Amino acid sequence: KRITVGVTITPKYHGWWSKRINDNIPRPIEECGRSINEHLRVVPSELEIIKQDFEKRSSEFGKKVEQLEEKKICLGLDVDIHKMEAEKLKKGKNNAEEDLDSLKIDCKKLRLSMRITSVGKTSEQWQQETRKKKPKLISVKRNFKMPELKRAF
């Protein structure tokens, strides 16, 4: 008889141990047509998946930020152009107002000078004046023509 100190192994356990298959070693399965590389594929952990998703979103946001910055620059240029156009229009408006004011002053001066020189009479005023002076003119013409007729005879 032998005496063993330590772990005792029963014949039943020893039989099971010898027939056991090591599940950690990948072997091609006859039923499935996948290659060994597919079997050995490393499944990423949840942390790695989150990290990859974060990097993907970060790059997308980076691209969007670049696009928005370009758009901002273009809009800034448009704003500058519109400001310059607005300044030009304001200057033009001011010049037009100054011209209008000077024209109003010139018009007032012209009306005043027309009143002083009586050039600013209306057609009705002229007709009335000619009606009043027409009889005098006719009498002057008659007086002027009479001496001429006398000389002719």
Image (cartoon, rainbow, N blue to C red):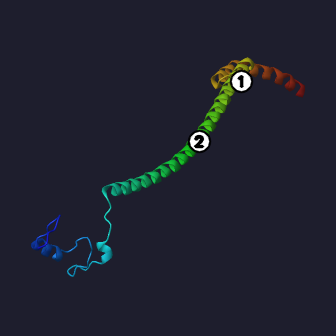
Residue 47: quarter of image = bottom left
Residue 1 location, x and y as percent?
A: 11, 73
The vertical placement of 44 against 29, above or below, is: above
Q: Residue at x 83, y 22 (%)?
A: 144
Tell which tag, 2 or 1, sits nearer the viewer. 2
Q: Nearer the viewer, residue 50 or 59?
A: 50
Q: Is residue 33 visible?
A: yes
- Mark 1 secondary-structure assignment: helix
Give the residue type that dot 1 points to: Leu
Q: Which residue is mark 2?
A: 80
Residue 91: quarter of image = top right
**33 horizontally vs 94: left or right:** left
**67 horizontally vs 9: left or right:** right
Residue 112 location, x and y as percent?
A: 71, 19
Q: Which mark is residue 110?
A: 1
Residue 29: quarter of image = bottom left
**127 horizontally vs 149: left or right:** left
Q: Residue at x 42, y 52 (%)?
A: 58
Between discs 2 and 1, the one toward the N terminus: 2
Image quadrant where one finds the C terminus: top right
User: Distance of mark 2 from mark 1, alpha carbons?
Assistant: 45 Å
Residue 22 location, x and y as percent?
A: 22, 73
Q: Residue at x 57, y 45 (%)?
A: 77
The vertical placement of 25 against 123, above or below, is: below
The vertical placement of 32 against 110, above or below, is: below
